[in-house]
Image (cartoon, rainbow, N blue to C red):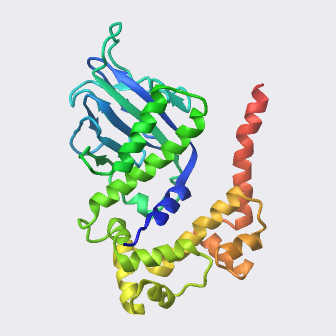
Amino acid sequence: MVTPMDVLSDAITSMRTGRPHAGRTEKHGSWGVRFPDSDGAGFHVVLQGACWILPPDGEPLALGPGDVVFMPHGRGYGLADGPRTPLAEFSGSLPGPFARDASVPGTAAPDAAVPDTVLLCGAYLLDRLRPHPLLAELPQVLHIPARLGRHPELRSAVELLGGELERPRPGASAVLTSLLDMLLLYVLRAWYEEQSGRAGTGWAAALHDRPVSEALRAIHRDPAHPWTVETLGQAAGLSRAAFARRFTALAGRSPLAYLTWWRMTLAARLLRESELPLRAVAERSGYTSEFAFAKAFKREYGVAPGGYRRRGQESEAAPAATSLAQR
């Protein structure tokens, strides 16, 4: 069976920025919080008890023990003990990368009282200026209900994450960062597995279609290769015309359009995160000519590669200068 997880991993890596945040919170009595719009993608896991997620559009959704919910698009939403509970505005962020209590407003707990609800709450920072289509088409709420025997890797990651947040030990920061990255992959993997066979088009269908998945794997494995529709069709095991129709129908763009989009996405990351000369960036992006690469990059981003790199360096230098000035 073809496994498309390398494509999923690349999609997440292309958008993830900064460090993830997470906390464990215990709630008593009546409580509710409204999270504002943000650059983050939030998640909640019900460890004990129950609660409700209140999306910006659509009906409230009940969550039970073991349920996982992921909000990928940064839209504001509510979380509460009931669908009609008044919501207090969440005005801050988690008090550190990882916290014992995520400080969700609620009723004060009596001494030594057993909490009604225990949650893992967290967020990932995503670059939304250029979302990968695989993530862009996700619904506003991903709900992975607890089902016996389903998604054991996700359940194991939740259990490990909950244990680390409840009992911090040496090395917790590194462990938690890795567990949160694993959790994001497992959540998305679980959701796409749930969609297998349901979606006729879109990336849920593309990832589970053998020919299209094979072509995507080939592109992501070696984006600098001089791919053509014909050679990608050969990798997919289809004729040129049949492959082009199938890929476009499922992925929403032609094979070469996606190839160019992915190459430019990788090039932008190299310009931001490395000191490679432009010629090397061009070669790694599949261009033998630096001029052709610069032309394609400017068409995609509206700025030349050198200007894009300088702009990124200036934006990184600005917070550092502000911090120094405040000392």
Residue at x 30% of width, y 25% of height = 117
Residue 265 position, x and y percent, is 58, 65
Question: Where is 323 relative to 277, above or below?
Answer: above
Residue at x 55% of width, y 73% of height = 221
| Residue 103 at least partly seen | yes
Looking at this view, is 191 or 242 the one in front? Answer: 191
Question: Where is 275 relative to 206, above or below?
Answer: above
Count the numbered circles shown.
0
On screen, residue 95 versus residue 289, left or right, reads: left
Residue 50 position, x and y percent, is 25, 30
Residue 316 position, x and y percent, is 71, 46
| Residue 294 at least partly seen | no
Quadrant including the C terminus: top right
Residue at x 37% of width, y 67% of height = 203
Residue with the most extreme top position: 111
Looking at this view, is 62 or 40 the one in front? Answer: 62
Quadrant including the N terminus: bottom left
Question: Quadrant of the rendered structure where residue 201 is?
Answer: bottom left
Question: Where is 259 relative to 129, above or below?
Answer: below
On screen, residue 28 versus residue 223, left or right, reads: left
Residue 224 position, x and y percent, is 62, 77
On screen, residue 230 versus residue 203, left or right, reads: right
Residue at x 34% of width, y 70% of height = 208
